[in-house]
Amino acid sequence: MPNSDIDAPIFAPDAFRIASADAKLIERARQFGAKVLAPRAAEHDRAATFPIENFRDMHGEGLLAICVPKEDGGLGADFKTYCLAAAELGRYCGATALSWNMHVCSTLWTGALADELDLSPDERALHATRRRVHYHRIVADGAIYSQPFSEGGAAAAGVVAFGTEARPVKGGFIVNGKKIFASLSGAADYYGVLCTERAEGEDASRRNTLYVAIPAAAQGMNVTGDWDPLGMRGTVSRTLLFKDVFVPEEEMLMPHGVYFRAASTFPHMFLTLSPTYMGLAQAAYDFTVSYLRGEVPGTPPVKRRMFPTKQIAVAEMRVMLEQTKALWFQAISEARANPTREQVLRAYAAQHTVMENANALAAKAIRTCGGQAMLKSLPLERIYRDSRCGSLMLPWTAEICLDRLGRETLYQPGEKDD
Ligand SMILES: Cc1cc2nc3c(=O)[nH]c(=O)nc-3n(C[C@H](O)[C@H](O)[C@H](O)COP(=O)(O)OP(=O)(O)OC[C@H]3O[C@@H](n4cnc5c(N)ncnc54)[C@H](O)[C@@H]3O)c2cc1C
């Protein structure tokens, strides 16, 4: 009898008390991942090419607009529902789920998340007008947005102001700078760039972080460098160069100063890279169970489940997976403006756990299943390589999460030793 648990929802709606409308949306993502993403994943991984057809199909499914508010024509998913849907996609193609996250965040952060921030009536009205333009492009035209933050210095970790700068000029800004590891490079229609707004003679400040959408076709905007990494190869995360790029004011994704406030009051916004890796953790476990039962398509029906060593390995994997799921589900359920200190510490712990455990589970899956399981004709070795990338992702790398967890547990805000 084939195993009906494989490909079941990662978080069963009844068990995790997920509302039925949200569960339907997550189910839509799961079906899409299994039917559309899975068959295409190996090819893009091997060639390190961006799966643009996945994004065109996501537009057809409404998934590009998953977090666009319903009144603007989107599916109106909240933070938690988005995370659960993204985990389902990550199960079938890590690179697509991670790239999709970059796109979706440009709508989640400007949508449900911004709605929870303390904006003045003027800021809110201006923001509503501007974001509608972006949402319309996505809903009507299937426009794809990316999210380049990283610059190779300390800015992406949130320590100093971004080196990419926007000089205010009449009607907009002149942007100069460089972003590295920009997923969807060459494929996105708009790059949602974080830069420092700085007038002549002014000091650079993180408070003046500006979040603007730069059209891919803008003059002075270039994609450069090659892309041949260990994992997440389909994200095509190359380097972006901006040389005197004029960006009209209307392209602001958040009003002046609001990104800084969002990052300070809604820290869970940085947890949004984790769903992909939650999905990869589940995928490593699912593969192992199927393989040991002799049920992986394309492999001989050889069973290996009768050996006690395999049973113990699967039991240990299950324990790790359940621990990961429980902590992560709690953390994504707590995402809100002004979370308690405990909730923020739990979010760091959840991010660290998912990113590290996804790769630990994949490594264990390879050791348990054996040599034939890591051939490139099967998805496990791709899951292993993709999952390796999770703990490197700024601003909440595994190391930074530990760093903050230790310090912020031992020191109350403002406490010093002298
Ligand atoms: C597949 C993939 C896709 C990506 N896509 C995007 C994207 O779309 N947009 C984007 O902006 N970025 C993206 N990134 C970039 C990612 O977030 C990192 O910026 C990138 O991995 C580069 O890191 P680095 O080696 O320059 O880190 P470095 O800054 O050199 O840091 C190295 C390590 O030191 C530690 N460290 C760094 N700063 C601190 C600190 N202040 N305190 C304590 N420890 C610290 C961290 O653990 C970090 O891993 C992507 C990365 C990958 C792997």
Image (cartoon, rainbow, N blue to C red):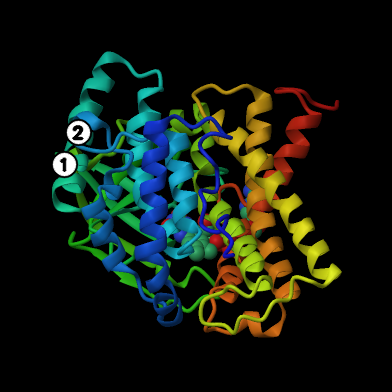
Mark 1 to mark 2 CA distance (whole Å): 7 Å
- The answer to whether residue 316 is above or below residue 331 is below
Q: In which quadrant will I find the N terminus?
A: bottom right
Q: Dot 2 lies on which element?
A: helix
Residue where numbered disc 2 is placed: 72
Figure quadrant of residue 404:
top right
Please tell me which residue lies in front, 341 or 138: 138
Q: Quarter holding the C terminus?
A: top right
Question: Which amino acid type is shown beneath numbered disc 1?
Answer: His
Image coordinates for residue 361, horizontal then vertical, percent: 69, 62
Question: Could you tell me which residue is drawn at 40 percent across and 59 percent down?
Answer: 33
Mark yes or no: residue 91 visible.
yes
Q: Nearer the viewer, residue 79 or 24?
A: 24
Q: Check disc 1 and report the residue beneath it.
A: 136
User: Where ligand 1 lies, by quadrant?
Assistant: bottom right
Task: Find out whether the residues at labels 1 and 2 contact each other: C-beta distance under 8 Å.
Answer: yes
Q: Residues within 10 Å of mark 1 (few under 14, many from 20)?
A: some
Residue at 40 percent across and 30 percent down: it is 113
Classed neighbour count for the residue bearing mark 2: other residues with Cα under 10 Å, few (<14), some (14–19), many (≥20): some
Mark 1 and ligand 1: say if the CB distance to the nearest ligand atom is below 8 Å: no
Residue 259 in view here: no
The disc labelled 2 sits on which kind of residue? Answer: Asp
Q: Earlier in the sequence, mark 1 or mark 2?
A: 2
Q: Position of residue 68 (x, y in %)?
A: 28, 37
